[in-house]
Amino acid sequence: MNETSTLWWDTGNQSIHYIEQTLLPNEYAIVECRSIERLATAIRRLEIRGAPALGVAGGYGVALAAVLAEKKDMQLFMAAVQRDADLLRSTRPTAINLAWGIDRVLASMQPAQDCRDACTRAIAEAKEIAREDTACCHAIGKHGAALLPDTCTVLTHCNAGALACSSWGTALGVIRSAVNEGKKVKVISCETRPLLQGARLTAWELARDGIDVTTITDSTAAHLMRQGAIDAVVVGADRITSDAVFNKIGTYMHAVCAHHHKIPFYVAAPRSTFDAKNTETDVIIEERGRDEVTIMGGRTYVPERAHVKNYAFDATPMELVTAIITETGVLRPPVDIHKLLSHHNTT
Ligand code: MRU
């Protein structure tokens, strides 16, 4: 199976490289990014997307900010890095991994003696986040694969694959690991309106790996569940509080249907996605622009005077979640997030 990275640090050029995801599946392009403004735009436009990948991007973003500010004295240097970190943090509010990656690299710079030392530390920490993310995905894959029957059809929503992480994927990591173990897994990929991450990215990734994938419109999911065609739902997450799982808009709808049809509903996510400080009502759900909903293939389908709501995410209450698959094992709700986060890191 392909295991290329979604984004990485170029040591020679001191820059970030990433797969430009808005062009897939028609064009596979690698972009080199050397400015914080460009990185912020890439995150807002979903050129880089998916919670764990945003964590890695946040980490590399702080490293890039440090490299760009390196010549200034230490106080000016830290102020410049902090300004850039704040800009990156503001790009997408729901996925907690973005702020987590930014804060982790900022914290790694604290003991630095001078700007050069701070840069070296920032780059090393950002690379470590990327390395750990891949290791977490493989561990999640192993734990999650054990939950799937030897022959099964799994429904997933959005893209929680290699493209949403450093590599391998969370929900798709579970599927990849199960296939590697010899299980016969078919995947139903919901197209995921309005930006079609399921149709464009999940179907592209799985087809490239030779995994059997069928794309459906989001509204077909309940119909297939009623027909008995789905054995499990596996999705990723952008943030997990003690009472809810935040993921791509439409996830809640699948969870309700899965519950009704007694189909297990699994969430696959690393511990960097857990939020011990907030509960459901504290979390900001990103709302995006009208055009994403109203324009398709260059044509406008909604009358100008009609209102549009474009929520990027929804919250699934914990009682609809069968289990959460993390790098340290499988958790059955209720989840003690403090205990989970204090668990010794093994990746
Ligand atoms: O808006 P996106 O494409 O960044 O949304 C991504 C998702 O909702 C994913 O399911 C989530 O980030 C988990 S990725 C492992």
Image (cartoon, rainbow, N blue to C red):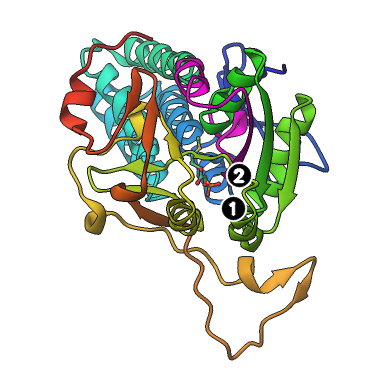
User: Is the C-beta separation of discs 1 and 2 under 8 Å?
Assistant: yes
Q: Is residue 23 visible?
A: no
Of residues 22 and 210, which is closer to you in this image?
A: 210
Give SS at disc 2.
loop
- Residue segment shown in magenta: 138-165
Q: Residue at x 66, y 87 (%)?
A: 303
Residue, disc 2? 230
Q: How many marks?
A: 2
User: How many other residues sit within 10 Å of disc 1, few (<14), some (14-19) or many (≥20)?
Assistant: many
Of residues 36 and 160, which is closer to you in this image?
A: 160
| Image disc number at residue 225 | 1
Is 80 drawn above or below residue 244 in the view shown? above
Which amino acid, mark 2? Ile
User: How many other residues sit within 10 Å of disc 2, few (<14), some (14-19) or many (≥20)?
Assistant: many
Residue 45 shown in magenta:
no
Q: Residue at x 36, y 44 (%)?
A: 321
The C terminus - image quarter: top left
Residue 151 shown in magenta:
yes
Of residues 54 and 107, which is closer to you in this image?
A: 54
Label 2 CB less than 8 angstroms from ligand 1: no
The percent coordinates of residue 290 (x first, y second) are 57, 72
Is 319 drawn above or below residue 232 in the view shown? below
Give SS at disc 1.
helix
